Amino acid sequence: MTFFPDAQRFIQIGSLSITWYAILMISGVGVTFYFSLKEMKKCGYNIEVAEDLAIGCFLWGIVGARLWFCLFFDIGYYLENPIRFLQTYNGGLAIQGGLFAGALYGLYYAKKHKFDFIRLADCIVPNMLIAQAIGRWGNFINQEAHGSAVSEAYFNYFPEFIKNNMFINGTYYAPTFLYESVLNLIGFILIYFVIKKLNNKYHFMKRGDGIWFYLVWYGWSRFIVEGLRTDSLMFGPIRMAQLISVVFIVVGVLGYLGLFKKFIKTKQPVLLFDLDGTLLDTEPAILETYRHLFEKYRTVEEFDREKQLEVLGPPLAKMFPIYFPDKNTDDLIKEYREYNFKIHPEFVKPMNNCEELLKSCKEQGYKIGVVSTKFKDGVKLGLDLFNLTQYVDVVLGQDDVQHGKPNPEGIFKACTELGEGHDSCIYVGDSATDIFAAHNAGVYSIGYIFNEERSQKLKDSKPNVLIHDLIEIKEILKEDHPWTYNMM
């Protein structure tokens, strides 16, 4: 095993070697993955999705980059001996071919898992600029992707190591790799750290804008730099990279102007509801059941208004250890449920306009689900009591998930059971816990103010919109925008 056997290779192990080009390329992918994962988490995608996409796009990107190079370099040469297609160690990868192949894999993956391709691409594509910026230094190591011959004085203001490595076979060449690397880095900083940060304040971006910004920036910068290179892939008399760059610029500008909007239609959102305090007014039943337990195991006087407000929303398993630390939580939950079910007909009623809203949405073809912290049989009991089950396509209770709210597992599982992704989804709830679950899933949230005493916490959780009557949702559904937390 030999480290640094020559300028191009990092390590030599027998007949196998790892080049600096490969290390830089993988490093670029790693940095892109880091920034993309941060964006994807904001949109509710988990790390498994990010890893699947990273591996798939990278592998297919390599295939696409190789085929693109072979196609426009000298396809006849490679067809004479097809094994040459595999000899990447002899050079020959074209980033634009890799971008197309990676995008096609991303499209396939999104369709397969019912994700929104444009939203996924928005999380990833702008970060490709940092990978491209790092990858160009692999060209520097290999002494390729350079410009025409220049004088030694050309490098007076360049670092010495760049000057030395651009001295090839007795001639100095312009370091066009560096120009493109710097421009890619500037583009990444502008999109990720400037434009996106400004958008967090002023909210001027829409879904797809990250892609359009990337295409325009990479398109014009690559067009300029490509004109200075001496090793361009040609399509007749045209530099292929410049032709594709023009296409990128045109697509990016048209996309930003919204001219593709009719081809990227806003999908009808999945409608998910909390149950207690959202579809059904179960507050009296909850308070009466807690009052019953306090009377039995503590004192009724201790169940003051502060505690009454505290118990509305959180699951029983969280509250019982606080109020009844000397009692077995599982036994208490069982006792709570038995008493609560018994008093349901007397103490529970549907929210105003609940059935009218559900019926209207069902008639318009919306897929409707209930995601609650109650056990499933309790949810169904309440829905059946008022004949609301007919409008609901899926019901998930606390016993259907491993992690309750604010973990987004229930929202994701409901979307899956409805045969949909979460990229167009609305979650309606009356507590901060509901809204945080929606935020964690990256979905659009509607905060329903039913109890004014609890409204401040709900407002502080920052739902996309607040309502005081469920019927207001009918007007909200008429809006035309992506149904996600960041409206993108």
Image: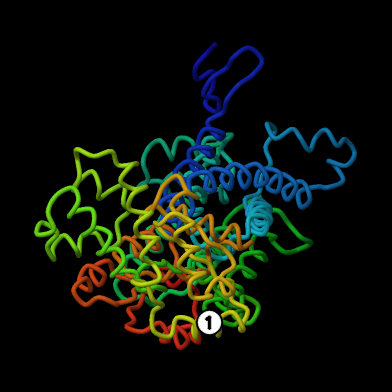
Q: Is residue 208 above or below residue 3?
A: below
What residue occupies the far right of the structure in this picture? 80
Q: Nearer the viewer, residue 187 or 376?
A: 376
Q: Residue at x 43, y 40 (%)?
A: 162
Q: Is residue 209 visible?
A: no
Relative image position of residue 194 (x, y in whole percent): 33, 65
Q: Amino acid at mark 1?
A: Leu
Where's residue 288, x and y in %?
A: 26, 64
Q: Between residue 147 and residue 118, name the one nearer to us.
A: 118
Residue 157 rendering spot, x and y as whole percentages: 34, 48
Q: Is residue 20 left or right of residue 106?
A: left
89 on left or right of 281 = right
Task: Give above or below for 12 relative to 473.
Answer: above
Please, is residue 258 above or below residue 348 in the view?
below
Query: Residue visible at 27% across and 66% down?
Result: 461
Q: Which residue is labeled 1 in the image?
A: 257
Q: Is residue 424 left or right of residue 309?
A: right
Q: Which residue is located at x 52 percent, y 47 percent?
A: 50
Can residue 349 be seen?
yes
In the image shown, does 106 or 364 lie closer to the viewer?
364
Q: Quadrant of residue 471?
A: bottom left
Q: Nearer the viewer, residue 450 or 421?
A: 450
Instruction: Answer few, some or many: residues within 10 Å of disc 1's Cα (few below 14, many 20 plus, some between 14 and 19).
Output: few
Element type at marker 1? Answer: loop
